[in-house]
Amino acid sequence: MANLLGTRYAKSQKVILVWDNLNTHTPGAFYEAFPPEDARELVKRIEFRYTPKHGSWLNVAENELGCMTSQCLKSERIGSVKELARNTAAWATQRNSGQKAVRWHFNIGKARVKLQTLYPKFE
């Protein structure tokens, strides 16, 4: 992150950083990795955004990458970066025009049954 802020985003006053809710993804992690003065300068330039705690956006992203791999990349040899960009852009345009929705099958009721040992018991 320090490298990105010092090079690619050196002229940016504020950078929005999207993190998932992993326990190490906190501004405090910068203070563990850098001297306090450096960490403070980095943290001041970052606006932290977190993904939803109870939404599995990562699964959606993994599903889309899997679809792209099987539908766009596996069937043929791609000879150049330009061709890769053209193929994936065409695939994304077609995929986005279809507006596929994610239907979650694992709901609260099913979670309470499957994960009942994790839920508190009140007597």
Image (cartoon, rainbow, N blue to C red):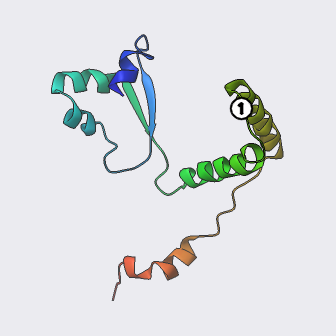
Residue 75, x across and y down, in percent: 78, 47
Image quarter hosting the N terminus: top left
Please tell me which residue lies in front, 120 or 85: 85
* Residue at figure coordinates x 71%, y 24% from the top left: 82
Instruction: Name the residue that disc number 1 marks.
Output: 84
In the image, residue 52 above or below residue 91: below
| Tally of marks | 1
Query: Which image quarter holds the C terminus?
Result: bottom left
**Residue found 50% across the figure and 80% down from its top:** 114
Return the x and y of residue 109 as percentages of the image width and height: 56, 77
Give the left or right position of residue 110, taking residue 25 as reference: right
Q: Going by the image, does 120 lie left or right of 92? A: left
Going 26% across and 20% down the picture, which residue do you hit? 41
Instruction: Give the camera-side residue of 48 and 64.
Output: 64
> What's the residue type where badge 1 is placed?
Leu
Report which quarter residue 34 is drawn in: top left
What residue occupies the far top of the structure in this picture?
Answer: 11
Name of the residue lying farthest toward the bottom: 123
Query: In the figure, 56 relative to 7: above or below?
Result: below
Using the image as rendered, state which of residue 2 and residue 82 is in the foreground.
82
Image position, residue 51 (x, y; %): 48, 46
Residue at image coords 74%, 39%: 77
Q: Residues within 10 Å of mark 1 (few under 14, many from 20)?
A: some
Residue 119 seen: no
Look at the image and tell me whether residue 22 can be seen: yes
Residue 41 is left or right of residue 120, and the answer is left
- Tag 1's secondary structure? helix
Residue 50 spot, x, y in % from top left: 44, 42
| Residue 85 placement: quadrant | top right
